[in-house]
């Protein structure tokens, strides 16, 4: 209460802090209403639906925790959590590693750098569904270009998305191609903001390129990498379009992530109550995930005087 | 033919062939293009000035309706806004709009093999029987008796309601590569056993040649298995509504499906829907392709297909006890929430009139439901496709029987058994997979019948 805000001065006449708080609330009300309507209400309604047997036709009956118990014993759902985590881990790690590498490369000065940077970020601009359709063709085991390339250098052909064993890494390949440029852009921004002095003194001390990267660049740019990781994590967790278009969760259920499972329950089976239960569980998983990421981000911030 | 007669006596849901008797009387009746407008004093213009929204599933048949839409507008003075949406999204949007209690469309397209029972349960489509009996609404030359017995049975609900008029049927056939068959020195097979032998004779994966291809992708693959099951005179859900999916016949059909796809199909078939199958077959590397009959047009297009002019069209082979062609189909209905139901019905009547049904056949967009279109030699002679295609169409229509069970949770059925079938291709045991899938699906089916 020690800070005197401009609002408080303008309202002037009322000196009582409690009254003033109510006056502030009046200004916050429109935002509160909007938040309630678009966030709180749908969320509460989803929880409400998740406790009902809710189809599109027929009656709606209260079933308590039945949907959640069913989820616990639903092998497909448990597997879909595993698929989601596997996909997410790969879809964060690979683009981040490659993106940081690309950023370091593009941070150097070399001829045609601008043009090459522009070419490198082009995949990011394409529509995910269109990309997915093109990759589907490229993955084709007999007619796809990927197997043509493999066999023309003497490697055995792969089944890519057509085998349960390789489907998730193959899907991650699409993600890597699509989103590595975004990581590169974020990290490149970070690199540009770094001071040059530490490098100058490192050069004088005879540090190698790797030592400079490991002990100067990497720690300094880590907060930016964390931002990229968080953005990638959000994108990877919610990936739906590429998986749905390329495999629809198949072969069988080998690439069925929580999103695909959820979509199937809600929009193919019209089992709205069960789908809502999936949403609630997914929400809890996302909250846990975010807390971990926020904690990790705190640890990477440049905190010197603490 | 004998099989057809027998099955009609033995199963209540089997009356889906083309009505051989009706067919015989209609063969030879000359096909005359008659402008509907020329007909007597029927008042086409009674809803002049109204506007209709028509919601179509994306396919060549819908495209044909849109192409000739101006004809309807001129005939009736009703303006039309029509939209084609890809199948899956079309089905979802319908359900979402219907459950909301008001629809943005007046006329919509229904896939019988997926939506028939669901729509009946929701009461979402208007019963068209009163309209069909009303001489002021049904043009005198509409001739409802002209629709094949099978398609009318497909369009009729269990309680006798007709919430759609039949639009097209899609019996499954076998496309076969004449060159590969000639090279192997074999004929098109008549039986499942013969099909296996043919696949074996042609299959040479080292050379990039494969015996057979059919859908392996989960959900899309289920009709292949239920279709094969018809050869044992067995549907996945029997007349009493009980699942037959763990019967010896169902297991035998699954074994056959597994052998065809695991041993004689291209690698990766587990992820193939019809379009990947089509691509493989068009490359000339596959002996046989099992699917719906609507693919003649792309296969015979020399610009994109390496097998143009070399495609054989075969009737679905005979199983150990019966010969049937798995049947799918769609109709046009009027939304129960539409404020313009009568005008909407006029559109349905126009879209399924003789001229439009003949157009569908002539352009190769699909198989129409009117006997006058299918069995007219003049129409058949005017087709741009090989004679064998037309013969196969006629014969398939005659032995057709629903390819999927007529139940409410068709999507769950396709999904759960589809996963089981993909597992089989990857090596799992058919009997075990079917048992576990049935265990999963039975409660879903029971719940849907109870609710």
Image: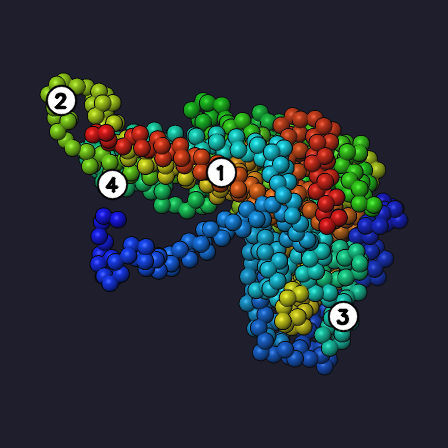
Q: Mark 4–mark 3 contact, CB under 8 Å?
A: no
C-alpha separation, residue under disc 4 versus residue under disc 3 = 69 Å
Q: Mark 2 highlights which residue? A: A203
Task: Residue lying at the far front in this picture: please name it.
Answer: A16
Q: Nearer the viewer, residue B238 or B287?
A: B238
Q: Chain of mark 4?
A: A
Q: In the rendering, at what x and y percent does residue B362 appear?
A: 65, 58
C-alpha separation, residue under disc 3 versus residue under disc 1 = 53 Å
C-alpha separation, residue under disc 2 versus residue under disc 1 = 49 Å
Element at badge 1? helix
C-alpha separation, residue under disc 4 versus residue under disc 1 = 44 Å
Q: Chain of mark 2?
A: A
| Mark number displayed over residue B130 | 3
**Above-or-below relation of B344 to B100:** below
Discs 4 and 2 carry the same chain letter: yes
Discs 3 and 1 carry the same chain letter: no
Disc 1 crowd rating (10 Å Cα; few below 14, some 14-19, many 20+) is few
Q: In the rendering, at what x and y percent does residue A41 appear?
A: 49, 53
Residue B220 in which image quadrant: top right
Q: Residue at left 22%, top 49%?
A: A3
**Above-or-below relation of B263 to A36:** above
Discs 4 and 3 carry the same chain letter: no
| Mark number displayed over residue A284 | 1
C-alpha separation, residue under disc 4 versus residue under disc 2 = 30 Å
Q: Mark 4 highlights which residue? A: A115
Q: Chain of mark 1?
A: A
Q: Which of pointers 3 and 1 indicates the residue nearer the eye?
A: 1
**Above-or-below relation of A195 to B75:** above
Is residue B298 something that shows in the picture?
Answer: no
Q: Residue at left 22%, top 56%?
A: A6
């Amino acid at each position: 209460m020690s800070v005197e805000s401009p609002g408080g001065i303008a309202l002037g006449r009322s000196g009582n802090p409690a009254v003033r708080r109510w006056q502030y609330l009046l200004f916050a009300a429109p935002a509160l209403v909007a938040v309630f309507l678009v966030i709180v209400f749908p969320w509460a309604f989803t929880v409400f639906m998740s406790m009902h047997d809710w189809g599109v036709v027929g009656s709606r009956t209260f079933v308590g925790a039945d949907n959640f118990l069913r989820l616990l014993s639903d092998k497909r759902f448990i597997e879909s959590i595993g698929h989601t985590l596997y996909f997410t881990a790969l879809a964060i790690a690979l683009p981040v590693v490659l993106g940081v590498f690309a950023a370091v490369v593009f941070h150097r000065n070399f001829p045609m750098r601008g043009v090459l940077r522009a070419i490198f970020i082009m995949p990011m601009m394409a529509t995910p569904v269109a990309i997915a359709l093109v990759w589907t063709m490229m993955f084709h085991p007999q007619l796809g270009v990927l197997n043509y390339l493999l066999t023309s250098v003497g490697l055995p052909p792969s089944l890519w998305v057509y085998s349960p064993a390789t489907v998730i890494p193959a899907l991650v390949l699409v993600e890597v191609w699509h989103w590595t440029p975004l990581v590169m852009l974020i990290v490149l921004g970070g690199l540009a903001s770094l001071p040059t002095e530490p490098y100058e003194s490192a050069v004088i001390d005879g540090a190698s390129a790797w030592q400079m990267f490991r002990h100067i660049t990497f720690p300094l740019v880590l907060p930016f990498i964390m931002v990229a990781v968080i953005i990638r994590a959000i994108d990877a967790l919610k990936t739906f379009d590429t998986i749905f278009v390329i495999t629809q969760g198949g072969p069988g259920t080998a690439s069925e992530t929580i999103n695909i499972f959820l979509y199937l329950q809600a929009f193919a089976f019209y089992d709205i109550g069960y789908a809502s239960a999936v949403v609630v569980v997914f929400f809890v998983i996302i909250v846990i995930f975010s807390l971990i990421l926020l904690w990790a981000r705190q640890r990477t911030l440049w905190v010197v005087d603490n | 033919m004998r099989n057809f007669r027998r099955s009609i006596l033995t199963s209540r849901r089997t009356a889906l062939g083309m009505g051989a008797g009706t067919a015989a009387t209609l063969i030879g009746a000359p096909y005359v293009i008659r402008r509907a407008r020329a007909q007597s004093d029927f008042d086409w213009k009674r809803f002049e000035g109204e506007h209709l929204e028509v919601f179509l599933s994306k396919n060549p048949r819908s495209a044909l309706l849109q192409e000739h839409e101006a004809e309807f507008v001129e005939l009736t003075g009703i303006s039309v806004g029509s939209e084609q949406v890809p199948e899956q999204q079309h089905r979802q949007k319908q359900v979402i709009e219907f459950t909301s209690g008001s629809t943005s469309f007046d006329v919509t397209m229904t896939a019988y093999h997926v939506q028939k029972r669901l729509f009946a349960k929701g009461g979402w489509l208007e019963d068209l029987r009163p309209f069909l009996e009303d001489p002021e609404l049904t043009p005198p030359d509409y001739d409802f008796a002209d629709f094949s017995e099978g398609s009318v049975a497909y369009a009729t609900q269990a309680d006798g309601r007709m919430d759609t008029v039949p639009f097209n049927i899609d019996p499954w056939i076998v496309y076969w590569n004449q060159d590969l068959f000639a090279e192997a020195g074999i004929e098109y097979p008549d039986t499942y056993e013969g099909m296996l032998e043919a696949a074996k004779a042609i299959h040479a994966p080292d050379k990039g040649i494969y015996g057979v291809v059919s859908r392996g992708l989960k959900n899309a693959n289920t009709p292949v298995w239920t279709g094969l099951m018809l050869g044992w005179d067995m549907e996945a859900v029997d007349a009493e509504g009980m699942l037959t999916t763990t019967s010896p016949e169902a297991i035998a059909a699954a074994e056959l499906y597994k052998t065809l796809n695991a041993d004689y199909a291209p690698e990766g078939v587990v992820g193939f829907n019809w379009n990947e199958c089509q691509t493989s077959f068009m490359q000339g590397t596959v002996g046989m392709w099992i699917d719906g009959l609507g693919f003649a047009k792309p296969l015979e297009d020399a610009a994109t297909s390496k097998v143009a002019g070399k495609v054989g069209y075969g009737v679905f082979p005979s199983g150990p006890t019966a010969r049937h062609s798995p049947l799918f189909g769609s109709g046009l209905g009027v939304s129960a929430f539409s404020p313009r139901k009568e005008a909407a019905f006029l559109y349905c009547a126009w879209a399924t009139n003789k001229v439009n049904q003949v157009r569908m056949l002539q352009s190769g967009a699909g198989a129409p439901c009117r006997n006058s279109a299918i069995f007219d030699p003049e129409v058949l002679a005017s087709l741009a496709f090989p004679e064998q295609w037309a013969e196969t169409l006629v014969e398939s229509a005659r032995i057709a029987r629903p390819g999927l069970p007529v139940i409410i949770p068709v999507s769950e059925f396709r999904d759960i058994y589809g996963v089981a079938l993909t597992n089989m291709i990857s090596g799992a045991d058919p009997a075990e997979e079917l048992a576990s899938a049935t265990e999963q699906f039975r409660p879903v089916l029971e719940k849907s019948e109870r609710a």
